[in-house]
Each structure stands twice: as C-alpha cells, then as structure tokens.
Amino acid sequence: MPRVAKRKDHPLSMRLPEGDIAVIDRAAGLRGRSRTDFVRDAAVRAAEEAIMEQALIRMSPGGFAAFMTAVSAPGRPIRGMVEMFGRKPPWKRKAGAR
C-alpha cells in the first residue's frame, strides 16, 4: 500500500484593510518576494522575538562571572568606526570630497 505524504502546509487566513495590503504588497515587491512569503517571514520573525523575550537564560556561576567581567570591561575602539565618525556627513562635504 503506497504511503501518503503528510501535508506540511497549514492554511492561515486573515482579513486586512486595503491600506495594510497595499503596504505589505509594496514592501514585498521591494524585497522581490511574494505577499505570502513576506507575511510568513515577518510573522515568524515577530513570533521568535516574542518567544526570546520570555526565554530564561541559565548559566553556571563561573559563566555568569565571566559574562559580568566581559560586559563590565571598558570598551575598545574599533578603527573603522572611529574613522567613520571622524568623517563629515555627506550633506556637509564639498562635491567630490570624501
């Protein structure tokens, strides 16, 4: 007897105002995605964020001490960022200058 594959897709239906659909369609188009793909990715990302906000992080006392040492240490400058913040913004530069 042949095996029947389980369907992996589960339908989800929503009623949205026309303005919301227009915004979603525009954003999906800008990303080169279908409305379904765009909405699915956005919903899954929002769900993951909500779950992570409630996730309990456990660590050993030694691990916690190492974590606290790392976050309490003074920051070190990152050369590329220091250079970037030293530049004039584009609207204050002369044409052709960097």
Image: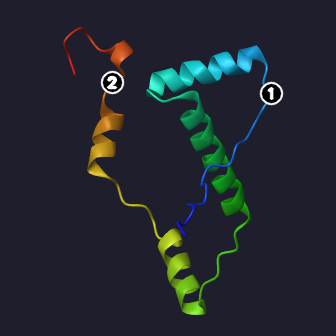
Does dot 2 land on a helix, a strand or a loop?
loop
Q: Quadrant of the C terminus?
A: top left
Residue 3, x across and y down, in percent: 54, 66
Residue placed furthest toward the front: 1
Q: For residue 36, which numbered disc appears in the image?
A: none
Q: Nearer the viewer, residue 71 or 56?
A: 56
Position of residue 53 in the picture relative to residue 17 (left or right):
left
Q: Position of residue 44 (x, y in %)?
A: 63, 49
Q: How many marks?
A: 2
Q: Amino acid at mark 1?
A: Arg
* Residue at horizontal 62 percent and vertical 49 percent from the top: 9
The residue singled out by tag 1 in the image is 15
**Which residue is tagged 2?**
88
In the rendering, at what x and y percent does residue 1 appear?
55, 70
Task: Measure how far apart labels 2 and 1 are at the Cα level.
Answer: 48 Å
Residue 92, quarter of picture: top left
